[in-house]
Image (spheres, rainbow, N blue to C red):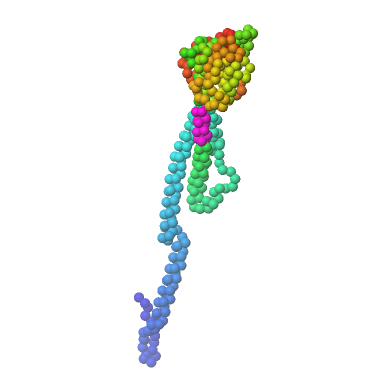
Amino acid sequence: MSKVKYYYDAETLSYKKIEEKASKKFGRIFLFALSSILVGFIGLIFLLNTSIINTPKELSLEREVRNFRLQYELLDKKMQQIEKVLANIEDRDNSIYRVYFEANPIPEEQRRAGFGGLNRYQSLEGYQNSDLIINTTKHMDIIQKQLVVQSKSLDEIAKMAADREELLAAIPAIQPVANENLKRMASGYGWRSDPFTKVRKRHWGMDFSAPKGTPIYATGNGKVIRADNRASGFGKHVRIDHGFGYVTIYAHMTEYNVRRGQTVKRGDIIGFVGSTGRSQAPHLHYEVWKDRKRINPINFYYGNLSPEEFQILLRNASQENQSLD
């Protein structure tokens, strides 16, 4: 309740009530209202610059930040699952695929190599959730690099698989004369008695005794590089380049069934048994070369002989007898 004031009127010798002018009263009310608004505004500014009160925009941004943080955490968990799957593929790549194709495993340091040079994540620093964002980005970069390494490895394995298929078809893997046409396995690889000089000398192939005109088969896929009688002692002979360092020689033929430059497949008839050149009787002299060195053909008959037939052939080939050429 407002305080009532009085003044003493000397003329009437009495106290009279002081009546406040309307303009002064209005001015006082106006000043109070203005000061209240000013104080309220200053208080609002202060509160808006603290964490006590957030604007609708700030509340919206805060919700977005929380959602982004949740999405990053979910993304990080998904990447951990991807890493587990990738690690399993890498393990199979090193311990199965590369072992099968006789290739060296990819070193762990190559698969896990980091990124050198300048700070790749400097632009992501200085924010409230910088650590989470930087760690997730690093995680993604590492997985991406691992995927690139693994992708190149699988490309290499695919090429090795294609090469292996071609290699398996090219390796001399069958007997050049069928068993049913053989009279006997006349002589094997190693030291033998020369049929003409009777001197013990090195025999670089295997002699298959068979009737004249017996078919001779290519022992692997390849290309005929010679079909002539210009090699000393071989008479009419054929040479096939199988690739991968393998070359086979078929000597003492009576007749050719191929020509130089012709492509042949395993099992194709390339000629017929004869006794041309330095030969004592109709037979096929057969040699296998690997990387320009002669090797024992006995190791290359797994394609068409049973284990029992191979054991018989091995026993006959190991006898140090007289060769036919």
Magenta stretch secondary structure, dominant: helix
Observer-nearest of 178 and 131: 178
Q: Which residues are magenta?
A: 153-168
- Residue 26 image point, x, y percent: 40, 79
Q: Position of residue 120 (x, y in %)?
A: 56, 48
Q: Quadrant of residue 62?
A: bottom left
Please give the name of the residue rendered at 47% of the width and 18% of the height, measured from the top-left corner.
304
Residue that lies at the very extreme toward the left in this rendered image: 1
Q: Any magenta on residue 129?
A: no
- Residue 160 drawn in magenta: yes
Position of residue 106 relative to residue 29, above or below, is above
Q: Residue at x 47, y 34 (%)?
A: 89
Asked if one can make out residue 193 in the rendered structure from this viewpoint, the answer is no
Q: Is residue 217 visible?
A: yes
Q: Which image quadrant for residue 203?
A: top right
Q: Residue at x 60, y 10 (%)?
A: 192
Give the left or right position of residue 51, taking residue 194 as reference. Answer: left
With respect to residue 107, does 185 lie above or below? above
Is residue 74 shown above or below 308?
A: below
Residue 271 % position (x, y): 53, 19
> Which residue shows up at 50% across the image and 41% down it?
143
Residue positioned most to the front: 255
Q: Quadrant of residue 11?
A: bottom left
Q: Is residue 143 left or right of residue 292?
A: left
